[in-house]
Image (cartoon, rainbow, N blue to C red):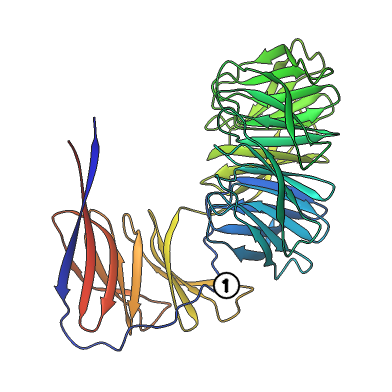
Amino acid sequence: MKRTVLLVLCLIGLCGTFAAHAQNVDYVGSTLWTDVNDVKVVGSYAYCAFAKGLVILDVSNPAAPAFVGQCYCQGTGQGVDVQGDHAYLADGASGLRVINITNPAAPFEEGLYNTPGTAYDVALARNYACVADGGSGLRVISITNPSAPLEVGFCDTPDDARGVAVAGDYAYVADGESGLRVINIANPAAPSEVGFYDTPDDAQGVAMAENYAYVTDRYSGLRVVNITNPAAPTEVGFYNTPGYAKGVAVSENYAYVADGASGLRVINITNPAGPFEESFYDTPGIAKCVVVEGNYACLADFGSGLRVINITNPAAPSEVGFYYTPSKASDMFVAGNYAYVAVQNFGLWIVNVSDPQHPTLAGSCDFDCAIDVFVAGNYAYVADYENGLWIVNVSDPQHPALAGSYGTQTAVLGVFVAGNYAYVAAGKIGRA
């Protein structure tokens, strides 16, 4: 059945006279980054691909991960890898971003290559970044000059390249409904497929260990594929996890699977032909990615931030720390020393950004489903979906107070203020 969306523009007169609306708004910082999709741990730092860019956390104390720095990006951070002084962010429709992390407290974008597809994952091989680019397959990008990354070759896989791992001269691509694809990258200018294994469901991620590729295959769990002969990979075993198998990491005799709503699953792979579940830890969010560093597994838990799991005893994993992001930050407006953030399920959050490296929460005002915000003078105008438009007095950022409201017949999706009028985009969703 066809789905249609009707947008209605409402013009609302505002009682009273307010100061001119803020101009020249720039992004400064936020404590509300959500939807972590991937994580890479190097030394004492965890580099997290969030929906809004890259966040760097200090995980030297696993029980208390601490915020260090962030780099805002306009795409949707999906995957990340780190090499030397740079983090490489697979940024969805915005391609590959190269972020300088020489100073972890002040990372900045140094280079960009806009791939033709949707960049979901990235794996580094010497001076090249191999990007799983959705419908555009595998892209091989030279990062010899980080400020000017350049594509040198590509291999168009048959379905949707979602994950990638590199071992030796081969890139192993989790290619959705086309399973595992093995691509020879010995000549980066002419990568070519040499073999494949069509998994039963939808390949999402892949990790390599010795002669095996461990593939997460959505609702078909973990698949163990022998790649001794890259031209003829063969499945030797599998374990059907209870959830949505998304990410995987391998350490010694265990595969750690990020299993969606079923959290972290610890799979014993001592015998690759007969893997079995050793234990599990049910995280509060949706587990999407996992990396193992020493005795800890760091889990990108969509909706619940970064979770740090102690796996010293694989039979009894336990959470020791987390960096929590409470909900989805839908929109932000910066005026003066404050960022006004519309946070779904939590309302309006006001963040003091006078010190951009250390933003702090100043005050908040609860709403049901805040999705857009505009600030003019001493007032914040919040689009609260089915609850209409809310007007909040923010003259005292530490104690914002409701000043008024306006209900519409359809869901309020956006708001813009000019002079004495608020322009509201209201949406009606129906079927035709």
Q: Residue at x 45, y 78 (%)?
A: 25
- Quadrant in the picture for residue 403: bottom left
Left/right placement of residue 334 relative to residue 265 reads left
Q: Residue 424: percent from the left, percent from the top?
A: 23, 66
For residue 163, side relative to residue 364 (left or right) = right
- Of residue 159 and residue 104, the one placed in the foreground of this image is 159
Quarter the N terminus occupies: top left
When the figure is inspected, residue 65 is found, relative to residue 22, above or below; the finding is above
Task: Residue at 16%, 65% (x, y): give it.
Answer: 10
Of residues 354 and 188, the one nearer the viewer is 188
Task: Residue 379: give x, y in percent of width and height.
Answer: 31, 79
Q: Please state the horizontal and vertical placement of residue 338, each as a whole percent of the image.
A: 47, 78
Secondary structure beneath label 1: loop
- The picture places residue 18, in percent across and down from the top left corner, at 25, 87
The residue under label 1 is: 359
Residue type highlighted by circle 1: Pro
Q: Is residue 284 visible?
A: no
In front of the other: 356 or 59: 356
Identify the residue at horizontal 55%, vertical 54% (top origin). 94
